[in-house]
Image (tube, rainbow, N blue to C red):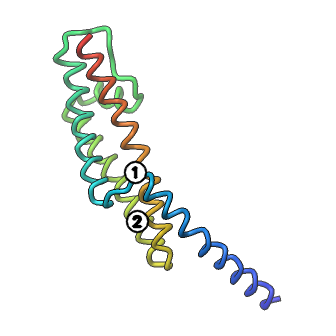
């Protein structure tokens, strides 16, 4: 019985090793730059998100627009923009921390390619979504 389990584990590792390289290559296509640059851009986009939200809601003079995100709307109502800044910072830090943690775990298990892929797959969607939000906020502020 233990021999069969050992064989299954060995086959599973072989399959994972074969998949690691293509998945790592796909993460390189998705984000061909160093991972540190992704963190830098995410920080920049989070800052632009907050600033554009502030401009769209406070400075544009347009009272027909409001925050669409339920949590952000609740935080704005409860504590205003200073508290929204704090919540945004905590959420971004938690997401980045999760990405680093997963990457470290995969690296520790000997799958550095999966670690990079997990890092990229966790953070690139947030980066793209934030770009869309910033563009939307700028358009709303101009209108």
Q: Label 2: few (<14), some or many (≥20) within 10 Å?
A: some
Nearest the camera: 92 or 22? Answer: 22
Residue at 47% x, 60% y is 118
Horizontal and vertical percent position of residue 53: 26, 26
Q: Is 33 rendered above or below residue 107?
A: above
Residue identifier under label 2: 101
Nearest the camera: 132 or 101? Answer: 132
Nearest the camera: 74 or 28? Answer: 28
Location of the N terminus (image quadrant)? bottom right
Nearest the camera: 119 or 30? Answer: 30
Would residue 139 appear left or right of 95 to someone viewing this image?
A: left
At mark 2, the secondary structure is helix
At mark 1, the secondary structure is helix
Horizontal and vertical percent position of residue 137: 29, 23
Location of the C terminus (image quadrant)? top left
Residue at 50% x, 67% y is 114
Instruction: Report the number of numbered marks.
Output: 2
Would residue 39 appear left or right of 119 to someone viewing this image?
A: left
Disc number placed over residue 110 in the picture, else none? none
Residue identifier under label 1: 123
Horizontal and vertical percent position of residue 83: 23, 36
């Amino acid at each position: 019985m233990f021999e069969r389990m050992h064989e299954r584990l060995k086959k599973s590792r072989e399959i994972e090793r074969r998949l690691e390289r293509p998945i790592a290559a796909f993460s390189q296509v998705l984000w061909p730059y160093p991972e540190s640059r992704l963190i830098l851009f995410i920080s920049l986009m989070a800052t632009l998100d907050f600033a554009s939200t502030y401009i769209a809601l406070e400075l544009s003079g347009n009272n027909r627009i409001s925050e669409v995100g339920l949590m952000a709307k609740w935080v704005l109502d409860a504590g205003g923009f200073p508290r929204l800044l704090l919540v945004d910072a905590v959420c971004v830090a938690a997401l980045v921390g999760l990405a680093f943690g997963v990457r470290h775990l995969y690296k520790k298990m000997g799958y550095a390619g999966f670690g990079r892929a997990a890092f990229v797959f966790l953070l690139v969607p947030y980066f793209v979504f934030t770009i869309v939000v910033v563009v939307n906020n700028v358009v709303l502020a101009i209108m």
